[in-house]
Image (cartoon, rainbow, N blue to C red):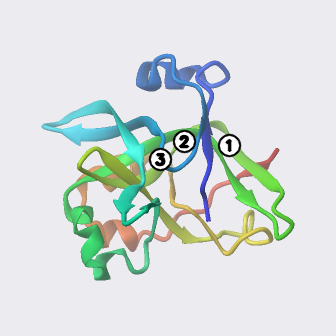
Amino acid sequence: MCRLYYIDHIKHQALQKIVHDYSGKVSPGMKAPIVIYVECHYMTKYMTWGFPFKDKYIYNARSETVLEKQFFQCVYHDRCLIPVSGFYEWTKKDQPISYELDKPFYIAGIYQNNHFCMITTKANHHVQHIHHRMPLVLQGDDVKRWLTDDFQTVLNMKDYEFILKEI
């Protein structure tokens, strides 16, 4: 389960327009930039990663069950993109493994009340040897579809195969 990602606007200069001078590791409870789509415009907002729940944060939502949970009803209209340079998964020995692409990418997210939550899916073959779940990574046309198409249609897209590198 992804509980840490990072943004490197120096290594990935394409992120500079989105995150400005924000770089570093992001963990639940921290403010970080997300991208929303409002009135045909992309906007960067800074929100806290995780929906408050009792004395903790709910920071991941499973793509397969998110529609069934009342807690995540914002999914129908408040979707966001989480710009990242990479994310971490942990081995059984609690060793972090970092995954990244050659360029920055987005993770699917939802938001409400200045908080955001990451959408996860079943791990592909690049990650499944470490963990059975991974963030729902978006690239290309999937980015705009995530923000604008019907949610069930977006979740049914099966083309989430991309080449992640362990670093």
Name the residue: 38% across, 70% down. 155
**Element on which disc 3 rests:** loop
Considering depth in this image, is 97 or 137 the residue closer to the camera?
97
Of callouts 2 and 3, which one flags the residue occurring earlier in the amino acid sequence?
3
* In this picture, residue 160 sits left or right of residue 87: left
* Disc 2 to disc 3, C-alpha distance: 21 Å
**Residue farthest toward the left in the current orientation of the protein:** 39
Q: Amino acid at mark 2?
A: Phe
Q: In the picture shown, does residue 25 fall above or below 70?
A: above
Query: Residue 166 location in percent, x, y?
Result: 80, 50
* Disc 1 to disc 3, C-alpha distance: 25 Å
Name the residue: 73% across, 71% down. 128
Q: Amino acid at mark 1?
A: Leu
Residue marked by disc 1:
101
Query: Residue 19 location in percent, x, y?
Result: 45, 25
Residue marked by disc 3:
29
Disc 1, disc 2: CB below 8 Å? yes
* In this picture, residue 16 sits left or right of residue 34: right
**Residue 105, numbered label:** 2
Name the residue: 46% across, 59% down. 59
Of callouts 1 and 3, which one flags the residue occurring earlier in the amino acid sequence?
3
Q: Amino acid at mark 3?
A: Gly
User: Is disc 1 surrounded by few (<14), some (14 to 19) or many (20+) residues within 10 Å?
Assistant: some
Q: Nearer the viewer, mark 1 or mark 3?
A: 3
Name the residue: 67% across, 75% down. 132
* Disc 1 to disc 2, C-alpha distance: 7 Å
